[in-house]
Image (tube, rainbow, N blue to C red):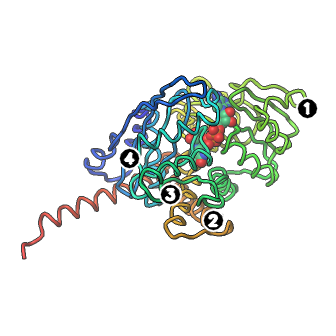
Amino acid sequence: MLHQALSRLYEAAGHLDITADVFEKLKSPRETTQARLVIRMDDGASKSYPAWRCRYDDTLGPTKGGIRFHPDVSIDEVETLAFLMTMKCALINLPFGGAKGGVQMDIHNLSATEQERLARRYVQCFAKVIGPNRDIPAPDLYTNSTIMAWMADEYAAIVGEVTPAVITGKPISLGGSLGREDATARGGYYLLLHQAQKLGLRSGARVAIQGFGNAGKHIAQLLGAAGFKIVAVTDSKGGIHCSSGFDVDKLIAAKRQGSVTSLAGSDGVCTLPADELVSVNCELLVLAALEDMVHAGNAARVKAHIILELANAPITPEADKILNAKNIVVLPDILANAGGVTVSYFEWVQNRQGDSWPIEQVHARLKTRMEQEGDAVWTLAQEKGITLRGAAYVHALSRLAGAIGAQDMQHFLIAEAPKR
Ligand code: NAD
């Protein structure tokens, strides 16, 4: 995975004047820590789970990235996602480097008390890696604000002082930011609406959504309220289709009971095999589940004209080429889902200021940043005749390369400074 992801960096470099030092710094992670988390289960037995935290690059600031709990988590996945976070933070112009963490486990097999023990054990094992000025975790797949609250509490117990800025995505009552819950989807939504005219996307357009967790649910709410028609949805249990468009509240209620698939059979809703979601007739396909979901084997079947990548790395490089040949426009992950880390940054700033911003301020700042960086990426793509993903990488890499070069220059100046 990391090799695949780095290929996009090397492609971007072809459009910039980059020194070898930049690649030397970005070709592999700065630091990956591995641990085995041993916890006591409710029945008295003990169980252990492999876990990782990767700080990929900290040129631009303390590293930032979510923690996921998922059976497929591996060191390769964690390092790849940490690399993507490095590019994302650079692209959206945050004073952060990139990181990621994960535990290889199925959260559905753990009770709430076991989940709490696991979350606290993670922090005990990685307490020296994380820190408000070093590495700041956040929620990701199958982790949420409750888990962040346990982690922040454990960190405070270890260091002996309340340190809310060590973790973002916390409950509001514990220093979380207003607007963090739907930030990933909202950032993608602002980007999409801002570029709708250029994309040829009209209100009323049909939308298919893969994944109905934090990102998928909120984009359904936002697009539904803006007049888009959600015609197909999948989650880990399967999918459903409704050509007249779903009532988003009903989708949310069904998911709360376990899966959106429980709506099948009601009001013109039929079952949709999960792997057929990408080939549903629609104008917009939102990918909000896992990596590599659109690949060489199914990319040719995509019917949408536009793809919004709220998930990280949901399209393989081979699939990218197929989609590009079909003139399908992809709003790439490092831009489209950057709303989450942007509001996480706002949360970190508020914690450090001892302040709390009103929701309007959070939304306005998020909108400005998504639109500004979205415009920069769009313009670069037009100027260089490349895809939006290519342009996003060029934009991010030029910021990173500038910072890496400035560090080198400082070292050079110190070394060469005349003796007084
Ligand atoms: P989540 O755990 O809240 O939801 C994941 C959803 O995906 C669930 O509905 C699950 O049922 C579904 N899913 C799992 N396997 C699936 C499959 N094979 N087909 C269809 N659906 C499947 O996670 P999330 O926070 O919404 O994250 C989703 C994606 O967005 C991930 O790639 C994550 O890295 C990315 N992302 C999330 C955030 C954030 O702030 N939450 C920020 C940036 C990127």
Q: Residues within 10 Å of mark 2 (few under 14, many from 20)?
A: many
Residue at image coords 72%, 32%: 234
**Does label 2 point to a residue whose CB lies under 8 Å from ligand 1?**
no
Q: Position of residue 213 (x, y in %)?
A: 68, 40
Q: Which mark is residue 268?
A: 1
| Helix, strand or loop status at disc 3 | loop
Q: Position of residue 4 (x, y in %)?
A: 43, 33
Q: Nearer the viewer, mark 3 or mark 2?
A: 2
Q: Residues within 10 Å of mark 4 (few under 14, many from 20)?
A: some
* Distance from the alpha carbon under mark 1 to that under mark 3: 41 Å
Instruction: Choose between 113 and 418: the one closer to the eye.
Output: 113
Q: Which mark is residue 92?
A: 3
First along the sequence among labels 1 and 4: 4
Do callouts 3 and 2 mark residues in contact (Cβ within 8 Å)?
no
First along the sequence among labels 4 and 3: 3
Residue identifier under label 2: 362
Residue identifier under label 4: 129
* Distance from the alpha carbon under mark 2 to that under mark 4: 29 Å
Q: Position of residue 375 (x, y in %)?
A: 56, 60
Q: Is residue 288 visible?
A: no
400 is higher (above) or lower (below) than 10: below
First along the sequence among labels 3 and 2: 3
Instruction: Choose between 166 and 28: the one closer to the eye.
Output: 166
Instruction: Choose between 273 and 347: the one closer to the eye.
Output: 347
275 is higher (above) or lower (below) than 136: above
Q: Amino acid at mark 3?
A: Ile
Instruction: Choose between 300 and 177: the one closer to the eye.
Output: 177
* Distance from the alpha carbon under mark 4 to that under mark 3: 24 Å
Residue at image coords 81%, 36%: 254
Residue at image coords 65%, 56%: 195
